[in-house]
Image (spheres, rainbow, N blue to C red):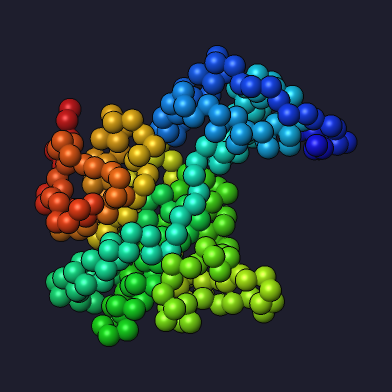
């Protein structure tokens, strides 16, 4: 194994590091929880070891203890934090994942909103935890399809994620044909551009869909407030990585960014039960905002 050292010098040989000791794992887990809200249980130690091995090779470090010393130095915190976040976040997703959410959006939420608002303002969507872009581009396809029979209908999509690596991939909007397998054939023909080199089996989202999406980096553990309230918030398969107190705080802040009458979509393995949010369930994992949240203090 080779790498260039941190100061840009010559490549050196680095072996596979020994197992991470418990003290180092505890330090990493606490730091990750405090920085981005993700709770790493003891069972995730092997996963963390495997994901950090590439960073150790790149940096020319021979142990996880040496990586911890580097990470928690002033220089390490400045240069390495984004790489650590990329290592511990899962950036895989599918187009039209949990397809009934998009059916509901197209058949219920959008028609109701259009009947109420028409062309008065754009329909605002937030894809919170957008990963590599499959979700916001799916939303762009659905809204574009809806607009074809509704003159003057406008929409815009804000897509955020904590991972800079995932956001870079989302902005490129280039996927393998296997990654795009969930897109219905009729929509593939309209919205996916195939590589001129067919052997590469790559596709790219068409420009008119890409223009509807704005990508931004956002850490849910930092203070945030959007420029305006949204009509729809998709936050799916995100809160499962947080402990219960963090989930409640985050979902309260997400609901603050949603207009009364707007919809929130969560993942199939997630629940808002017992959280006291101003949201009413209309279908499994689909909620409508019924009023403003009461803030304590």
Left or right? Give the position of 247 relative to 222: left
Frontmost residue, 94 versus 7: 94
Q: Position of residue 134 (x, y in %)?
A: 45, 61
**Residue that lies at the very extreme toward the top in this rendered image:** 23
Choose top left, top right, bottom left or bottom right for residue 252: top left
Frontmost residue, 100 versus 125: 100
Residue in the image at 33% along x and 72% along y? 143
Q: Quadrant of the N terminus?
A: top right
Picture layout, residue 270 above or below residue 153: above
Residue in the image at 80% along x and 30% along y? 14
Frontmost residue, 286 versus 259: 286
Frontmost residue, 80 versus 99: 99
- Residue 124 is at least partly visible in this image: no
Q: Quadrant of the C terminus?
A: top left
Residue in the image at 42% along x and 56% along y? 159
- Residue 248 is at least partly visible in this image: yes
Left or right? Give the position of 180 relative to 277: right
Q: Position of residue 200 (x, y in %)?
A: 67, 70
Picture layout, residue 41 above or below residue 9: above
Residue in the image at 32% along x and 84% along y? 148
Q: Position of residue 91 (x, y in %)?
A: 50, 49
Tally of marks:
0
Choose top left, top right, bottom left or bottom right for residue 246: top left
Left or right? Give the position of 141 relative to 111: right
Q: Position of residue 262 (x, y in %)?
A: 20, 58
């Amino acid at each position: 194994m080779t790498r260039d050292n941190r100061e840009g010098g010559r490549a050196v040989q680095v072996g596979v590091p020994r197992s991470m000791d418990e003290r180092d794992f505890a330090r990493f887990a606490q730091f990750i929880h405090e920085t981005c809200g993700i709770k790493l249980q003891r069972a995730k130690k092997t996963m963390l070891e495997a994901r950090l091995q590439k960073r150790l090779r790149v940096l020319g470090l021979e142990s996880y203890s040496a990586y911890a010393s580097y990470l928690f130095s002033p220089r390490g915190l400045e240069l390495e934090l984004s790489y650590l976040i990329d290592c511990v976040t899962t950036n895989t997703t599918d187009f039209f994942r949990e397809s009934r959410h998009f059916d509901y959006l197209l058949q219920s939420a959008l028609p109701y909103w259009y009947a109420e608002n028409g062309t008065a303002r754009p329909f605002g969507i937030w894809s919170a935890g957008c990963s590599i872009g499959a979700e916001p581009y799916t939303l762009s396809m659905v809204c574009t399809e809806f607009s074809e029979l509704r003159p003057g209908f406008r929409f815009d999509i804000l897509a955020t994620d904590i991972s800079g690596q995932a956001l870079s991939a989302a902005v490129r909007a280039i996927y393998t044909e296997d990654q795009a397998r969930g897109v219905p054939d009729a929509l593939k023909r309209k919205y996916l551009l195939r590589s001129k080199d067919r052997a590469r089996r790559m596709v790219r989202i068409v420009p008119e869909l890409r223009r509807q999406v704005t990508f931004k980096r956002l850490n849910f553990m930092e203070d945030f407030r959007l420029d305006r309230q949204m009509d729809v918030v998709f936050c799916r398969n995100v809160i499962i990585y947080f402990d219960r107190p963090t989930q409640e705080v985050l979902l309260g802040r997400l609901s603050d960014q949603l207009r009364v009458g707007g919809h929130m979509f969560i993942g199939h393995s997630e629940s808002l039960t017992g959280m006291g949010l101003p949201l009413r369930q209309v279908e499994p994992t689909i909620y409508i905002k019924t009023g403003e949240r009461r803030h304590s203090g």
